[in-house]
Image: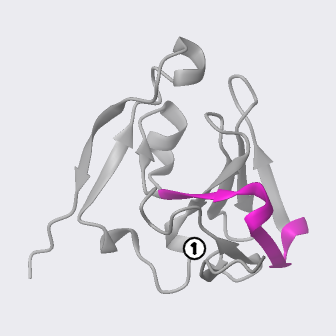
Amino acid sequence: MNDLRQQHSAACHCGSVQFKVRLTDEFNTIRRCSCSFCRMRGAIAVSAQLSDIEFIKGEDNLALYQFNTGTAKHYFCRTCGIYTHHQRRSNPNQFGVNVACIEGVSPFDFREVMVMDGISHPSDSGSRPKVAGILRFSPTE
């Protein structure tokens, strides 16, 4: 069967890491997280299945960061330091992809982004994911 989903080109800031990705539901899965790491990282992520990322260049230039339970795997370009994607803790069969790495997309393209409660992570509490709030962007012009 042919996969009719759009394939997006993506890269880190310096271009050392380049990949193509098909998103699970285009940009309908955008989110931020309130855990300690994501608060500091500040990226907006969108979901993709593990099999839906294809590295074109620089996969060997990715650094891995894990903390707490070690389930989530956060990847960064070793050259420019940009977070490109992570294997999700709440769904290890998916990657969260940094929308700012996707060609032609900016985090400021989204007026509202759900912020998920990563402090009370569903994997710790056994509950469903909870929304901690909404991040809003209101352009001045």
Residue 109 lies in what quarter of the image?
A: bottom left
Question: Residue 27, image x and y in percent?
Answer: 45, 66
Q: How is the image coloured?
A: one colour
Residue 53 among magenta residues:
yes
The residue sitting at 65% across, 42% down in the picture is 88
Q: Name the residue furthest right.
A: 60
Q: Is residue 106 left or right of residue 10?
A: left
What residue is disc 1 on?
101
The residue sitting at 33% across, 47% down in the picture is 114
Residue 53 lies in what quarter of the image?
A: bottom right
Question: Residue 8, image x and y in percent?
Answer: 61, 81
Question: Residue 63, image x and y in percent?
Answer: 80, 55
- 71 vs 7: above or below: above
Residue 127 among magenta residues:
no
- 92 vs 59: above or below: above
Q: Name the residue furthest top.
A: 125
Residue segment shown in magenta = 45-60
- Tell me which secondary structure the magenta stretch mostly adopts: strand
The quadrant of the image that shows the N terminus is bottom right
Residue 80 lies in what quarter of the image?
A: bottom right
Of residues 6 and 87, which is closer to you in this image?
6
Of residues 66 and 131, which is closer to you in this image?
131
Dot 1: element: helix
Tag count: 1
The residue sitting at 47% across, 56% down in the picture is 43
- 134 vs 17: above or below: above
Question: Residue 61, image x and y in percent?
Answer: 85, 67
Circle 1 residues within 10 Å: few <14, some 14–19, many ≥20: many
